[in-house]
Image: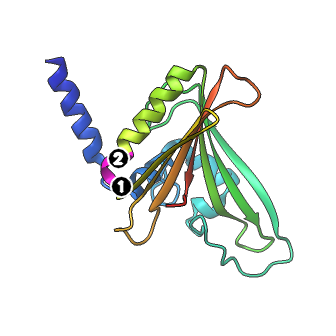
Amino acid sequence: MILVLNCLLNTAIHAQTNSINEYTQQLFFHIYTSQPDTSITAFLRDHIPSLYNKKAFMPGNTNTGTNTDNRIEIHTFVFNKHPYFAAGFVNGKLEFYCRHFADARGDQVFDAKLWFEFENQLEAEMAFSKLVERFLPISQGKRFSSTNGAQRAEFSDNRQGQGFNKIQFRLTADNLDRHRFKILFETGNEL
């Protein structure tokens, strides 16, 4: 009975999204859609109004025009629960890399990075495996590597046009505290 229930739940989870773009949007709290997750809307309104009002550029778009005030800023949303990724992380953070403009454009996001931090290696490895299992069936290209104890998984889907079609995530020990581990999720890879 438990085995059947587990199979049904896993099937339902995999049926929720059918592309790298859709699941990446979920992991990024739907910030690039017209309906961001309610857990992040106040942060967007207060710190990155261009995303809140949907005047933002997708990450990687460097067509930002000219401006005399061209500072780079990082805005970080910290959370301890994720609406689309249930794993044993201690906390997570979504870092927004922004180019600041003095005109009406304000802060424009050109990249975003998602971090999950874990108290122990087992929890981190289980979360990493969960992400791998999630992206395997929806990817055309896959590559796995390991360097100096850090693991990396890269996935791509060349079938889709716009949106996120290349992602990677890495599992590594925290450089400052060897008893803690991190997963870094990024858009883009070398596939």
Residue 84 visible here:
no
Residue 138 magenta = yes
| Drawn side of residue 80 relative to residue 177, left or right | left
Nearer-the-camera pick, 116 or 44 = 116
Q: Amino acid at mark 1?
A: Ser
Q: Which residues are magenta?
A: 135-139
The kind of residue on which mark 2 rests is Leu
Q: Residue at x 56, y 22 (%)?
A: 121
Quadrant location of residue 60? Answer: bottom right
Q: Residue 179 appears in which quarter of the rendering? A: top right
Looking at the figure, which quarter contains the N terminus? top left
Left or right relative to 84: residue 45: right
Viewer-proximal residue, 57 or 103?
57
Numbered circles on residues, count: 2
- Residue at 24% x, 32% y is 9
The one nearer the camera, 34 or 175, is 175
Q: Residue at label 2?
A: 136
* Secondary structure beneath label 2: helix
Q: Mainly helix, strand or loop, the magenta region?
A: helix
Give the residue drawn at x 74%, y 65%: 99
Where does label 1 land, which residue? 139
Tell me: residue 21, above or below residue 11: below
Pick whichever, 143 or 86, lies toward us.
143
Tag 1 secondary structure: loop
